[in-house]
Amino acid sequence: MNEIKIGIVCYPTFGGSGVVATELGKALAKEGHKVHFITYSQPSRLDFLNENLFYHEVDFHSYPLFEYPPYELALASKMVSVVKNERLDLLHVHYAIPHASAAYMAKQILKTHGITIPVVTTLHGTDITLVGKDDSYEPVVTFSINQSDGVTAVSEDLRKQTYQYFKITNEIDVIPNFIDLEKFKKQKKDHFKKAICPNDEVLVVHTSNFRKVKRVNDVIHVFANIHKEMPAKLLMIGDGPERNKAEAHCRELDICDDVRFLGKLEAVEEVLSVADLFLMPSEKESFGLAALEAMACEVPVISSNAGGIPELNIQGVTGFMSNIGDIEDMTRKALFVLDKGNLPKFKENALKRAKEFDISKILPLYEAHYQRIIEKVATEVRI
């Protein structure tokens, strides 16, 4: 495919949308495309040098007149500048709020300079299922999605919910999240496992941003039940508003000695490489990227059946799903997976499933989408 100059706009955080956007940009750069990140700080996973990768920081300042800095305006202005100066072929914005509306504004400004820039918007989840449904944002979200030249969603469930909640006239293509199997392949970390589980305990892991929708307390309760039946340890990766409650629950259940809160980690694959089971009891999950990362490290998953998770976690094969909040059912299924006679097969199946989402298989879908949108917009301009 010919080189494409792409501007990627995302949240530069540990969250799923930022991770996906950054890993996608890195993969595109390796394929020879020029990739320009436009964010308010350097993305957390933009951690290597490549001649095709560029970073443009969005500057926005506080003034006494503004209660909150007008980030969306600063972002639109930066998009205009980068598109003009770097002669970009396409803008790809991740997460509808406020990136899609800022891209629309930038596109209109660029038209006054005689520049037409195609815009692709990728929907990731809470920008649709939570924040976007808010009456304060819904009209802008609907308009921005409909004004995008291309729209993608990370799961079929998210696509369906977008059409359900919003009056969308645009076509939405499903391009699932992906994994870099080279990065997440299981590593031999026997010394690390021995340090955490000195008496050969099973190791359970949870990763999230510790918001209410992740149901972190369910993780604690499921683990406490597992702990009653077999020697076990739990590692909690991430941070957020529910962490204090989760720590308090550990004290109430008297399991603190076997639970560690590790905070935010860059190299989650090092922990996942020694894990035996991953817990994801979320009440909302557009795809379940953290579960896919676990599977790539040969870790089976016990999850809820929320959102797009059933499109990833295969019941009875890569793990099990339960209804949201059904702690007892999750416990029973977790104990079944952790049985020494069952665990090896579940681990093997988890990796096999993860291979279906390797970035080498998903990247061409994005490249084809870009090419189609660029050609569509060029045709519209000629007409």
Image (spheres, rainbow, N blue to C red):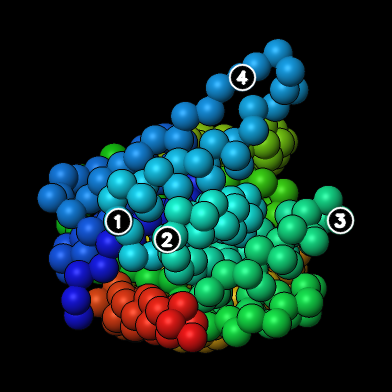
Question: What amino acid type should be assigned to the residue bearing mark 4?
Answer: Ser
Question: What amino acid type should be assigned to the residue bearing mark 1?
Answer: Arg
Tags 1 and 4 touching, CB below 8 Å:
no
Residue at figure coordinates x 13%, y 50% from the top left = 51
Tags 2 and 3 touching, CB below 8 Å:
no
Of residues 326 and 351, which is closer to you in this image? 351
Q: Pick out the residue farthest to the top.
A: 64
Label located before the other in sequence (3 or 4): 4
Of residues 316 and 364, which is closer to you in this image? 364
| Cα–Cα gap, marks 3 and 4 | 27 Å
Assign a secondary structure to mark 3.
loop
Residue at figure coordinates x 67%, y 36% from the top left = 241
Mark 1, residue position: 87
Residue at figure coordinates x 72%, y 66% from the top left = 143
Q: Pick out the residue farthest to the right.
A: 135
Q: Nearer the viewer, mark 3 or mark 4?
A: 4
Q: Mark 3 Cα within 10 Å, few/some/many (few <14, many 20+)?
A: few
| Cα–Cα gap, marks 1 and 4 | 30 Å
User: Picture quarter containing residue 2?
Assistant: bottom left
Mark 4, residue position: 62
Mark 2, residue position: 115
Label located before the other in sequence (2 or 4): 4
Mark 3, residue position: 135
85 with respect to 147 (left or right)? left
Label located before the other in sequence (3 or 1): 1
Question: What amino acid type should be assigned to the residue bearing mark 2?
Answer: Ile
